Image (tube, rainbow, N blue to C red):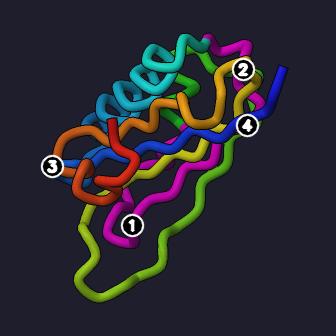
Amino acid sequence: MAVRAVRGAVQLEQDEAGHMHEQVSELLTEILRRNSLGPDDLISVWFTATPDLHSDFPAAAARMIGITDVPLICAQELDVAGAMPRVVRILAHVETDTERSKIAHVYLGAAGALRKDIAQ
């Protein structure tokens, strides 16, 4: 079994905790689904948020959907002029037999513009 990294992102419509929980939960669920993974396959998950998001920690959404025994951490993205606003990114480390080239990186909605080269 190999350790792989899976990326993803979503742009929030507003900085509101309930909306963040909904969108981040959808993103994390979709990452797991598209890669045929379950919570037991997760090693750790990094969440980052752009500096304009203050309503809650993105990792709270993972806890709300039952991911309770996986190390999670949140960090703030660099404040780069012209960067897409209200974005939460995920970098999940997983155990999987899937080849690196077959990993599905998930960029929902407008966040698909962030990584057109790997967004699926």
Which tag, 2 or 4, sits closer to the chain's start? 4
Q: Which residues are magenta?
A: 38-59
Is 111 placed above or below 53 here? above
| Residue 17 on the magenta span | no
Q: Nearer the viewer, mark 3 or mark 4?
A: 4
* Residue under the point 65% across and 27% down: 99
Q: Decide if residue 26 is on the left or right side of residue 103.
A: left
Of residues 66 and 109, the one nearer the viewer is 109
Which residue is disc 1 drawn over?
A: 50
**Residue 89 at x, y percent in the picture:** 45, 51
Instruction: State the separation of the CA atoms marked 1 and 2.
Output: 29 Å
Q: Say which element carries label 2.
A: strand
Quadrant in the rendering for residue 18: top left
Q: Nearer the viewer, mark 1 or mark 2?
A: 2
Residue flagged by tag 3: what amino acid is it? Answer: Glu
Q: In the rendering, which numbered label is found on residue 44? A: 4
Quadrant in the rendering for residue 75: bottom right
Which tag, 1 or 4, sits closer to the chain's start? 4
Residue flagged by tag 2: what amino acid is it? Answer: Thr
Q: Say which element carries label 1.
A: loop
Q: Say which element carries label 3.
A: loop
- The reply to whether callout 1 and callout 2 are in contact (CB within 8 Å) is no
